[in-house]
Image (spheres, helix red, strand yellow):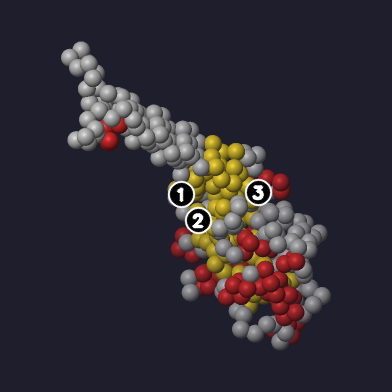
Amino acid sequence: MAQGSNFVDYVKVCCRSGHGGAGSAHLHRDKHTATGGPDGGDGGRGGHIILKGTTNLWTLLHLKYRKHIIASNGESGGSSLRTGATGRDEILEVPLGTIAKDAETGEVLFDITEDGETRILVPGGKGGLGNWHFKSPTQQTPRFSQPGLPGKEQWMILELKVLADVGLVGFPNAGKSTLLSVVSAAKPEIANYPFTTLVPNLGMVSYRDNRSFVMADIPGIIEGASEGKGLGYRFLRHIERNSVLLFMVPADTDRTIREEYAILLNELTAYNPELADKPKLLAITKSDMLDDELEKEMELELPENVPYIFISSVTGKNILPLKDMIWKAINS
């Protein structure tokens, strides 16, 4: 996963598709025919601007400095009904979870969710018709053809929302990065200060019977994030694409577990009320510092109707049962 300034999840680009080529108004001629019938071919289509999904990218960094995307024009038709060459398409590879929007209206055009999926972002202009299309009983030798249609120029917004099976939700230093590093091959930065994680990190978590799921470590939320505080709402949108939300609250929190969970949930629903409908799990982290009696006391202050588990990424306590909970929630 890209780190720091290499993670780009929003770009605005000007896209210009190719013009269609002109149709030909050619009349057939050879040594036996001075002026024959129409044989002008059609113009070629202008190049499209196309988005293509790929699992090889995690960020829109490669498009950050490409402010203008221009496809080639189609070529004019030729004699002998030859169609002009199609303009070269401009194919932009994007990570899965990329949404395309019209920059002027904000309309969501489509999103890319599958590897190899291709969608036309801006279509090229249609090629003009050659003069043979216009031959008629009263017009045997039309000396005119159609021009090609112009391409389109549009400002587009490409916005990445990370696709993951489970998203880790918690305040800074809740142990999200540590858990991700333990259950996957991801190597997020881990340190004892707020906002160690500045970009979303993804990891593939191996499960039983060669199964797996994708876990996303979303940068730490703080109270007021939905209003732009801390890292703000920039990364909250990544949570929208997670199938299951795993709330993580450390055992040494200054609040009660119920209070901290409520604040986290409030920040998510203030940003997008639909997030309240996602399956939710609760992991109380750093539980290696608790004895059985303290753990039982904490259970009395947990939120209702949320499956919970006490874990420790340091000792490995309940990590496999946590995977079981996540897998069950993903597939329920």
Residue at point 47%, 54% (across, down): 114
The three-letter code of the residue at mark 2 reads Phe
Earlier-in-chain disc, 1 versus 3: 3
Foreground tag (2 vs 3): 2
Along the line of sight, which residue is nearer the eye, 22 or 259? Answer: 22
In three-dimensional space, the C-alpha distance between marks 1 and 3, rounded to whole angstroms, equals 21 Å
Foreground tag (1 vs 3): 1
The three-letter code of the residue at mark 1 reads Arg
Along the line of sight, which residue is nearer the eye, 41 or 272? Answer: 41
| Viewer can see residue 93 | yes
Q: Where is residue 52 in the image (x, y as percent from the top left)?
A: 48, 46
Q: In this view, does 149 lie to the left or right of 285?
A: left
Residue at point 60%, 38% (across, down): 68
Q: Which mark is residue 119?
A: 1
Residue density around tag 1, few if under 14, some if 14–19, many if 20 or more, within 10 Å:
some
Q: Position of residue 299 (x, y in %)?
A: 69, 84
Earlier-in-chain disc, 2 versus 3: 3
From this view, report whether residue 43 is shown above or below residue 233. Answer: above
Q: Which secondary structure lies at badge 2?
A: strand
Q: In this view, does 14 lie to the left or right of 4?
A: left
Residue density around tag 2, few if under 14, some if 14–19, many if 20 or more, within 10 Å:
few
Residue density around tag 3, few if under 14, some if 14–19, many if 20 or more, within 10 Å:
some
Tell me the residue that label 2 is attached to: 110
Tell me the residue that label 3 is attached to: 8
Q: Position of residue 118 (x, y in %)?
A: 45, 48
The three-letter code of the residue at mark 3 reads Val
Q: Which secondary structure lies at badge 1?
A: strand
Circles 2 and 1 in contact, beta carbons < 8 Å: yes
Q: Residue 247 carries which label?
A: none
Along the line of sight, which residue is nearer the eye, 28 or 51? Answer: 28
